[in-house]
Image (tube, grey):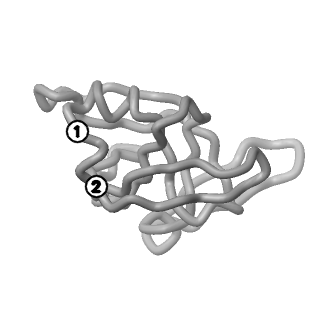
Amino acid sequence: MKVGLNDAEGAIFEISMIVDSGADITVLSKRIGDIMGINVEKGEEKIFRGIAGEIIAYVHKIPLFIDGKGLEVRVAFALAEVPNLLGRLDISRNFEINFRKEEDFCFSD
């Protein structure tokens, strides 16, 4: 799905993200944080474990736009290059997410 983020100048740019119902938190790579003008390593350091092993990431609260709705979301910026994952934290309380067999998923307020 497409999600909007602010770049360093405040303009919105879109990235593709994987909706991961098993991910506790949204995860982006440091490269995306750099585009946003975020000093990634100033965030709260966390170690995350998953199917690919451990990654070090830094948590920041950022604005994120889904279907035109702006949210303040905690995002873990990984030092390693990782897939863009949209996790549950700060997302699931704002949207009902439905996965439908043989169809796309949908977000609704």
Q: Give the residue type at disc 2.
A: Gly
Q: Position of residue 42 (x, y in %)?
A: 23, 50
Residue 87: percent from the left, percent from the top? 56, 57
Calculate the distance from the C-alpha at mark 1 to the C-alpha at mark 2.
9 Å
Instruction: From the top left corner, tell me how far across and down residue 58 is, in percent.
Output: 38, 52
Q: Is residue 10 left or right of residue 46?
A: left
In the shown orientation, is residue 38 left or right of residue 105?
left
Residue 38 has which mark?
1
Cβ atoms under marks 1 and 2 closer than 8 Å: yes
- Image quadrant in which you'd find residue 34: top left
User: Tag 1: residue type?
Assistant: Ile
Which sits in the foreground, 27 or 1? 27
Q: Which of pointers 1 and 2 indicates the residue nearer the eye?
A: 2
Seen in the picture, residue 29 relative to 62 is either above or below; the reply is above
Q: Secondary structure at mark 2?
A: loop
* Residue shown at 25% from the left, 29% from the top: 12
Q: SS for tag 1?
A: loop
Badge number at residue 21: none
As drawn, which residue projects farthest toward the bottom? 93
Q: Dot 1 surroundings within 10 Å: few (below 14), some, or many (20 or more)?
A: some
- Mark carried by residue 43: 2
Residue 96 makes an appearance in the image: yes
- Measured as percent of width and height from the top left, residue 15 is found at 46, 28
Q: Residue furthest right?
A: 102
Label located before the other in sequence (1 or 2): 1
